[in-house]
Amino acid sequence: MYNTEWKLLTYIDLQEADKNLETVKKYAQLSMEFCNRHVHTYWINLTDCTKITRYIDRQIKEVEDLKLLVRQLTGVEDEEQVRF
């Protein structure tokens, strides 16, 4: 038997991740606006709107917190230098 230690190195294009996050945030905003406009109408996807309005802010906040963590781990505090 051999004692082997594996190290994993992963490359993430932070600029691409930042663009994807902005797209998700825009879509989330549009979805919430749609749900707010149709709050008094009866339609089949009402449960989806209920879920979106409950969880979307929390999930985006979690990603934003992870974005801050990446900045802290890389030692770069300037958002313009490290984009996620």
Image: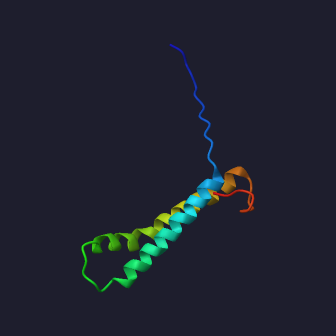
Pick the residue in front: 75 or 31.
31
The quadrant in which residue 65 appears is bottom right
- Please provide percent x and percent y for residue 80: 74, 62
Identify which residue is drawn at 38% across, 84% down: 37
Above-or-below relation of 35 to 20? below
Q: Nearer the viewer, residue 22 or 67?
A: 22
Classify the position of the C terminus by image quarter: bottom right
Q: Residue at x 34, y 73 (%)?
A: 49
Q: Residue furthest top?
A: 1
**Colouring mode (rainbow / by chain / secondary structure / one colour):** rainbow
Q: Residue at x 74, y 60 (%)?
A: 77
The picture places residue 24, in percent across and down from the top left corner, at 51, 64
Q: Is residue 79 left or right of residue 21?
A: right
- How far from the left and from the top, in percent, is residue 56? 44, 68
How far across and how far down the image is residue 43, in percent? 25, 77
Q: Is residue 54 above or below residue 78?
A: below
3 displayed left or right of 76: left
User: Which image quadrant for residue 48?
Assistant: bottom left
The residue located at (59%, 34%) in the rendering is 8
**Total count of labels:** 0
